Amino acid sequence: MQTLDPTPSEPPVLVGEPANLVPPKSPRRIGWARRRRALSAFWKTYRRSRMGMVGLVMMILFILLAVVGPFFVPAKDVSVAFATGKPFQPPTVHWLLGTDNFGRSVLSLIVVGSRISLIVGFAATVVTMVLGAGIGIASGFYGGKTDTLLNALTNWFLVIPWIALAIVMASILGPTLLNIILIIGITSWAGTARLVRAQALTVKERPYVERARALGGGDLHTIAHHILPNVMPVIFANTVLTVALSILAETTLSLLGLGDPNSISWGGIINEAFQAGALSAGYWWWIIPPGVMIVLVVLAFTMCGYALDEIINPRLRAR
Amino acid sequence: MTPQRIAQIEHDQGLDRPLPQQFVVYAENTLTGRFGISFVTNESVTTVIARAIWPTVLLVGSATLISTFFGLWAGIKGAWGRGSLFDTTSLFGSLVLYSAPEGWLGMILLIIFVGTFHWFPAGQMSSNTGQTGIANVLDILSHLFLPCMTLVLGYIGEYTIIMRSSLLEVMGEDFVMTARAKGVPDRLVRRSHAVPNALLPTLTLVFYSFGFILGGSVIVEAVFSWPGLGLLTYRAIQDLDYNVIQAVFLLFSLAVIAFNLAADITYGYLDPRVREA
């Protein structure tokens, strides 16, 4: 990619201007300074959004919990064979959130489950974004037959109800963590692709793209250096919202019994409680807390996403 | 089971043929309306689905109507008094409800209204005591209430947010200012100038989100043992009843496509600008 870059590595010598008045700067440093300025201006706008800041703080807390939390839970606490509590114990001072059918502390399960829930959320989002951005950019940038084909594919995936497709794929592929991530990604990229395609269509008509092409920039260079950076803000806000949707999707699949039975996730805990008859027996401590965690984490990502969208989306900013 | 019997079943189901041929047979059967038999009950899939379709229409239909009505109402009231206590509360409430998984919401309602207060039956569609007439209708309604409320709570937030932002967009338009300038009372500006224009895009989105409410019904029906397509799907997943899963997939997709088409046609009918374009 670097060899295709038409920007000169030395600053252009401006004829007729006295030398040494302006200290020479490399284009790279100018670029970084500009990025830093844009970032700090963005942060100033973002900081004003109360919804966005609350969401951001909650999001950081959840990520900390998922990264650090499981280290503080001994493996035997969440093991079916070695758990130390009595089964179905209501919350007490010692068992803050009671125990499940194997005598495992529900609190420990929730702490350990945070990691799987967030990993699925983030990994499925990566799949969604790579598929959505790739197909959207290819569709918008190349146009013509490619666009017709990819756009038809996008519309097909938009119309198929995701749950039906996810159920069919999950029951055929089998419930492993990787499959669940792939299924969520494959069923949810279409919205992103449509958004990115629309943005790519407007970006590719801008003069700097024409200039880059006139200077001999190839397709890959134009996409990587000119289209992608300008589509990025739209992708960014969409990414944060997609994490929220992916966590909800994982919960839905787990509740349908299509989750990975070998890993503990919040949706999986609720499903196990449901299967074990916790509802009719009134074991509320086994069902309510994991659901509250899901609500809070989805809320955090959604609030951040909306706040970002309000700053980035030109249609909303005008208001 | 003898090997001959297994071979016989494989032959009957067409499973001994090569995959491409199986696919052609599947496509042919689907297009001619033959969906095979359920592996579990041995009935034809068409019968099983025909039995389950009306409970789902009742549940999803009533939930869609109620959540649309109250969602639009809250969205209009919120946007018109932007920043008021009602607006902030309903916006925050909408976001929380939007973040909650439907199945879990249903379980919470079960814990509160059935486990604690014993106000409603725990599941299924009727008490099966053979009552008729009004008593039967009331019985079904009392079974319908909780699953319907679950779906309503699950989707009302989304509709409120959509209606609110759509109306906010319209409120900034010039014709609203014109109406105010010529002295139209606030109530009339809202009813005849702003809301009708904000309603159009919202209703389309409500139509488009039909697929999601249908998906949500799968879990809610499983939680409440509501004998519709959702519970059928849930059981079919547990039993790996592929013929039923395939048929339900097809039916759900067709329903969503039909609703999207209906949205496009309605939009063209209601908005002359779209018709001309």
Image (cartoon, coloured by chain):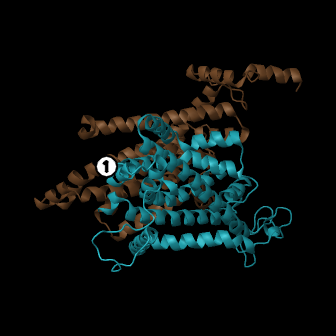
State which chain is coloured brown: B
Q: Is residue B217 visible?
A: no
Residue located at (60% from left, 58% from top): A121
Q: How many marks?
A: 1
- Residue extending farthest right: B2
Tell me if B62 is positioned left or right of A247 in this view.
Answer: left
In the image, A269 versus A162, the foreground residue is A162
Q: What is the drawing colour of chain A?
A: cyan
Q: Quadrant of residue B53?
A: top right
Q: Position of residue B88 (x, y in %)?
A: 39, 68
Residue located at (42% from left, 38% from top): B260
Tell me if A222 is positioned left or right of B108 in this view.
Answer: left
Q: Quadrant of residue B9?
A: top right
A311 up-or-down from A149: above or below: below
Q: Position of residue A179 (x, y in %)?
A: 68, 48
Residue located at (73% from left, 76% from top): A92
Tell me if A71 is positioned left or right of A50 in this view.
Answer: right
Q: Which residue is mark 1?
A: B199
Q: Amino acid at mark 1?
A: Leu
A126 up-or-down from B130: above or below: below
Q: Quadrant of residue A47?
A: bottom left
Secondary structure state at the residue bearing disc 1: helix
Task: Give the letter of the chain under mark 1.
Answer: B
Q: Position of residue B33 (x, y in %)?
A: 57, 22
B209 up-or-down from A123: above or below: above
In the image, A191 versus B243, the foreground residue is A191
